[in-house]
Image (cartoon, helix red, strand yellow):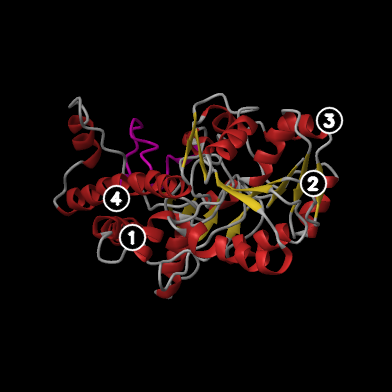
Amino acid sequence: MINVIGLGYIGLPTALMFARSGVKVVGTDNNKQLVNSLTEGKLTYEENGLEKLFKEAQENGIEFSTEYQRTSTYLLAVPTPYIKESKKLDPKYVISALNGVLDVCEKGATIIIESTITPGTIDRYIRPEIEKRNLVTGVDVHLVHAPERIIPGNMIYELEHNPRTIGADSREIGNEVKSLYSKFCNADIIVTDIRSAEMSKIVENTFRDVNIAFANELAKICRSDEMDIYEIIKIANMHPRVNILQPGPGVGGHCISVDPWFLVGDYPGLANLILAARKINDSMPQHVLSRIRDIMREHNIKDISKVGLYGLAYKENVDDTRESPTLQLLERMDEHLAFGVKVYDPFVKDRIVDNQFVNFKDFLNEIDILVVMVGHDHIISNIDRLKNKLILDTKKVFIEVEFSNLYYI
């Protein structure tokens, strides 16, 4: 049996995937409401294919509990935030989950950590906890790091088709965990040491952050001299060895917008390019705010309440708002005492900010300027309803559409 600890965006689909594959699974979370909902057969967030996977896992007997189970295999998928002041990882949730496991686990149990952690986290924080327990209880466990590699909106496919990395102290344990994941993962599974596994995940997300920052800085340069960033990127990308990404309103989610800070915090003075990229991407909401100001001045609009932000999620076609550029932009506006901007997202049903609309028609009726922060399919399918709006398109959604009042970042 596998006891999956943490039933959020990573833990839940992973638990369901194991269960569908025939593994006995108990999912554990300290959120009683969440556990009760799952036990009653109710999912807590939307994701393509998740409902079908949930039903298949239920048919195979998956269970949910607030209690840690006594077994030989554990999978930890709990949050790993960073400390904003130091930019270092905050390991409190991983340590708490670990101690919960150590309270009940069988001797020789394997503890798989899927949570994203910085290089050396297991040596600095996890092993000392186990060593303390060894002195008292004789707990003997095997540690493995198997960093998740999925993204909201495409989780099910990526669980099955993305290559995986297994970091373990011994090749034998690593191969055992590899066999476990191969029950549902159809891609390559590499077994390596723990520190290499820790570093590889951080490097993947940092690489993407740096590349996005390059595109965003180009956008600022082109804006300053009235050049078309999209035309320039299109031409440059015709070179066979050039692949510039598209600029945007900022970087969100729990991976790209957070993980690079771990390297900045752990390697001060060395992670200079990474730090610069983080600063550029974090500055984009402010850049969007400046573009909104430019449009308001051009059209003599003085009332900020006539501005509507479309999209609260951090990426298209999901309801995940973690580190959302829109939330970052609203925070900047709050700092400048700019209140009253309208907000709408077809995927975010719960009200999480002021002036958040649940009806798209009502939202459009209240605004003159539409700021597209997220390229949901919904906005593309409603193009005909936007003809009389001033549009700031931060996501290149309407690049092929002829609007008379269309602006870019």
**Mark 1 lies on residue:** 296
Element on which disc 4 rests: helix
How many other residues sit within 10 Å of disc 1, few (<14), some (14-19) or many (≥20)?
Answer: some
Q: Does the magenta stretch include residue 402?
A: yes
3 vs 1, front mark:
3
Q: Which amino acid does label 1 sit on?
A: Met
Q: Which of marks 4 and 2 is nearer the N terminus?
A: 2
> Is 283 placed above or below 146 here?
below
Q: Which of marks 3 and 4 is nearer the N terminus?
A: 3
Residues rendered magenta in the picture: 385-409
Q: Which amino acid does label 4 sit on?
A: Ala
Q: Distance between the residues labelled 4 and 1?
A: 27 Å
Q: Which of marks 1 and 2 is nearer the N terminus?
A: 2
Q: Position of residue 136 (x, y in %)?
A: 71, 69
Do the CB atoms of the residues marked 3 and 4 lie less than 8 Å apart? Answer: no
1 vs 2, front mark:
2
Q: What residue type is labelled 3?
A: Glu
**What residue is shown at x 57% (from left), y 42% (from top)?**
318
Q: Distance between the residues labelled 3 and 1?
A: 56 Å
> Is 354 placed above or below 222 here?
below
4 vs 1, front mark:
4
**Mark 2 lies on residue:** 38
Q: Earlier in the sequence, mark 4 or mark 1?
A: 4
> Is 52 placed above or below 389 here?
above
Q: Position of residue 246 (x, y in %)?
A: 31, 40
**Mark 3 lies on residue:** 59
The N terminus - image quarter:
top right
